[in-house]
Image (tube, rainbow, N blue to C red):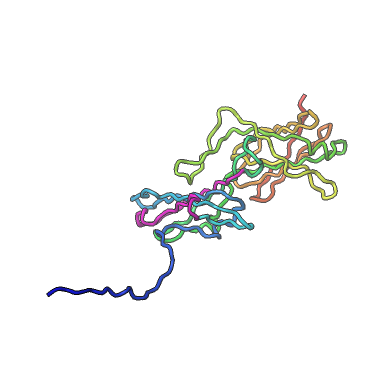
């Protein structure tokens, strides 16, 4: 007996669609990013509470984009998105260190004035494996790791014009350097052998109509500054006083400068509260 022919039935009608799959891991919500107002990269590092330690890939890289006044995680292909994967962590309780590194400097268009980046840091509460860490509650929010120094120049009664104050140069010396740690979620602050000159950037012009002062700003690693030098019309006005710059604090110094020095007053605004004593401004010979 031979087989004459065999007919194969067509595939029956089914369904089709599209989708995607990904390995489950640590994700970052927009509420975590409420303190971020620029693009950059957020790094996470998980540290186990138990003696089992953290397995390989216990760190994650989360590119941050900033659009329409909102920061969000950029997980697009090619962005560098590399989250922490649960399967790469031993089961147990963890704390997560977060470090945000901005793409650009806060107070200067280009590098060169020895400013620091506006690094943001945070540590999560103890979090069970498989549970997303939180950075939006008090004590765990992202905070500034650097200090900000604002110097506002005020003219005395026999002082300078707005144009002269706006053309001033303000500088200080920093004896600290900042680097991102090898785990990519830690920040290292160490001493410099030789102090580096920090030129404050003018962020606001003096204007009588609005009552604003010529303001110069810089982000500096936490440390004690020894002096601030203000140069106007080729003359140096030097504040010789130790200023304790603390992380997450903005120091707003109002300096009254006259052709015969009158004085110096200081106040602290924004980030966190502190107090400072009065000092004196002298003209270098």
Q: Residue furthest left?
A: 1
Q: Is residue 266 above or below residue 125?
A: above
Q: Which residues are magenta?
A: 75-104
Q: Is residue 272 left or right of residue 41?
A: right
Image coordinates of residue 64 in percent, x first then y, are: 55, 52
Q: As rendered, which of 203 and 269 lies closer to the eye?
A: 203
At 64% from the left and 44% from the top, the residue drawn is 106
Residue at 78% across / 36% down in the picture? 167
Q: Is residue 97 visible?
A: no
Using the rendered image of the protein, determine whether residue 172 is visible from the camera's viewpoint.
yes
- The image quadrant that residue 170 belongs to is top right
Q: Residue 259 appears at what percent x and percent y?
A: 84, 32
Task: Determine if the magenta segment contains residue 96.
Answer: yes
- Residue 183 in the figure: left or right of residue 71: left
Question: x, y percentage for residue 145?
Answer: 57, 45
Quarter assignment of residue 174: top right
């Amino acid at each position: 007996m031979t087989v004459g022919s065999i007919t194969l039935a067509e595939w029956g009608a089914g369904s089709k669609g599209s989708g995607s799959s990904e390995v489950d891991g640590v994700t970052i919500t927009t509420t975590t990013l409420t303190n971020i107002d620029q693009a950059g990269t957020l790094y996470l590092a998980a540290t186990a509470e138990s003696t089992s330690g953290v397995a390989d890939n216990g760190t994650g890289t989360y590119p941050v984009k900033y659009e329409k006044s909102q920061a969000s995680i950029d997980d697009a292909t090619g962005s560098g998105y590399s989250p922490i994967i649960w399967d790469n962590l031993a089961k147990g309780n963890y704390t997560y260190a977060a470090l945000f590194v901005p793409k650009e400097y806060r107070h200067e268009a280009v590098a060169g004035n020895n400013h620091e980046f506006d690094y943001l840091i945070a540590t999560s509460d103890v979090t069970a494996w498989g549970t997303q860490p939180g950075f939006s509650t008090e004590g765990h929010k992202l905070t500034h790791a650097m200090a900000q120094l604002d110097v506002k120049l005020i003219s005395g009664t026999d002082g300078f014009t707005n144009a002269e104050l706006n053309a001033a140069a303000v500088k200080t010396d920093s004896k600290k350097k900042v680097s991102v740690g090898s785990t990519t979620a830690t920040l290292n602050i160490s001493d410099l052998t030789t102090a580096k000159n920090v030129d404050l950037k003018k962020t606001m012009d003096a204007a009588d109509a609005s009552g604003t002062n010529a303001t110069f700003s810089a982000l500096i690693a936490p440390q004690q500054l020894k002096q601030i030098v203000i140069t106007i019309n080729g003359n140096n006005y030097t504040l010789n006083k130790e200023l304790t710059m603390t992380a997450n604090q903005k120091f707003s110094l109002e300096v009254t400068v006259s052709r015969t020095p009158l004085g110096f007053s200081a106040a602290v605004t924004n980030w966190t509260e502190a107090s400072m004593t009065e000092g004196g401004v002298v003209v270098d010979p």
